[in-house]
Image: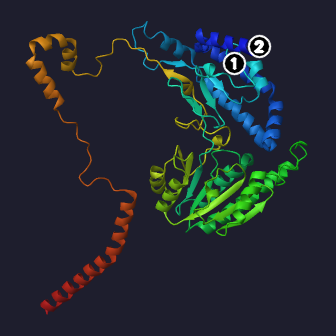
Amino acid sequence: MAADRELLSRLRAAKIDGRTQSIRYRQNQLKALHEQILYRGTDIRSAILADYNFTPTEALIELSRTISELRQHYETLNFENELEAEYSIEKGKSFETRRLGQTTQTLLPLLKKVLEESLDQDTFVALNYRPDKAMLDSCMIVDQSGNIEEQKSTVLPCLRSDHGSLTVAIIDRTADIESAATSIVSARLSFNGRSPLAPDRILVNEWVEKPFLEAVVREYSRHSSRSLHQESSPNSSAETNGKYKFANKELRNLLEEYKRDQKSRIVVEGATGAVIVSTNRSNSVLKTKIKSPLLVLQPISSLDDGIDLANSITPGSLLAVTVYASRPAAKYVSQFIHSNASYINHFPTSLLLGPAPPCGYATSIHTRYTREMFERPSPQFLDVSRKGQPPTMVYAIDNLSVLEVSKGKGVIAQLQKESALPLRATGQSLGGQIGFFEQGILWGATLAILPALTLLLGGGGYAVFKAYNYIRR
């Protein structure tokens, strides 16, 4: 404990002197971490295999993705640009985008040894216990498990990943069925089904339910064959042998729940997962977050039915929604489903790795955390208070005391005149815009009226022709 107190004291000292604000310091820390990850790469992959039931290829992908994200963060550090921005005030410019870093307390650090051996011990500390409240009150908390309460501090936010929110996929009748099945099966079965962003519920239009289910079963079979082949390959370690022998306890429990439901049927049940179709919308298990290789399909009658069902799954926003449909239909669905992010006709595979994106921030498909998440705004302004203000307003503010005495009727009248000016026109036509469903109604009306109109014009023309011939005789 005494040694830990010393480490925390050094951490506080580094925060006070602003050591991490230096771009050179951050560059050197990222380079050291990159080198240590490469050096310990084999050990890291072995740990992933042992802890997460991944295949050797999946473990390699996760390690490679980690290195790739580290590289992206490193490449965003531009010494010349940072230096120019730092001296903006000295050069007579405002620094409105200035941000200050915040101290972080990362829970459940991955690969403690690698981080300790690569990072500066004055700015990084790994503890086996939770620090006291006084320490946490001065820190930004990064909660990747979603198991702690959000920090109550009014100054520093909490980067909290919500692993309990559900993800939904919607398959419309206009979707590319084969492409959608391939994308969804890969997302749901890869990495042992543990990704928080893999679809928990797959809502498929009843018109294409049969062909989509057939495509899912085909893709499931191909995925299972590849996984079992990799497991039995000579390069597979002894630790990974038998991982796909249906040992996933959570999956077994979920299957038992669905077997007791008369409105659910198990379509495929195998060594690497299962596929289920359920028409029971009131079953509480349908609101359970899936953390195993299981696909749950539910038929829907229309886009509006899918929207209503998706929004009823959780009281708040969904973690994500993936829509497979034509662009107009996808636009309509993603507009009215309450979701943190929407993906149209694809699922970003980079999101399958790592924790759920932190709440309250825009989801990035490139990096899970961005630099801005760990900083707070602290702009520097250089005489820009008048920027964008009308000249009369600037004069009135600068001469407020004089106007109070003299009443400045001319200036006040001008202010009132400027305030009364109308806003510019929106440019929208009187008819407004035609929406997705309005287009459908117009097309339907056109198709219904056109045959009758054709007959009417054709009949009228024929009558005129006969009358003309009669008159000529």
Q: How many marks?
A: 2
Foreground residue, 210 or 354? 354
Residue plotted at (77% across, 56% down): 252
SS of the residue at dot 1?
loop
Going by the numbered disc 2, the residue's amino acid type is Ala
Identify which residue is drawn at 61% across, 27% down.
141
Residue 430 in the figure: left or right of residue 254: left
Tell me where residue 108 appears, x and y as whole percent. Answer: 71, 30
The picture quadrant where one finds residue 19 is top right
Residue 226 visible in the picture: yes
42 left or right, relative to 302: right
Q: Nearer the viewer, residue 125 or 235?
A: 125
Location of residue 119 with respect to 320 vertically, above or below: above
**Residue closest to the eye, 382 or 84:** 382
The image position of residue 73, as x and y in percent, is 62, 26
In space, the residues marked 1 and 2 are separated at their CA atoms by: 14 Å
At a point 42% along the width and 9% down the height, the residue shown is 89
* Residue displayed at 56% across by 51% down: 322
User: What residue is disc 2 on?
Assistant: 3
Q: Amino acid at mark 1?
A: Phe
Residue 241, how many percent across, how many down? 88, 47
Packing grade of label 2 (10 A; few <14, some 14-19, many >=20) is few
**Quarter of the image where one finds residue 284:** bottom right
Q: Nearer the viewer, residue 295 or 186?
A: 295
Q: Is residue 147 left or right of residue 43?
A: left
Whether residue 218 is visible, yes or no, is no
Quarter that holds the N terminus? top right
Q: Which residue is mark 1?
A: 124
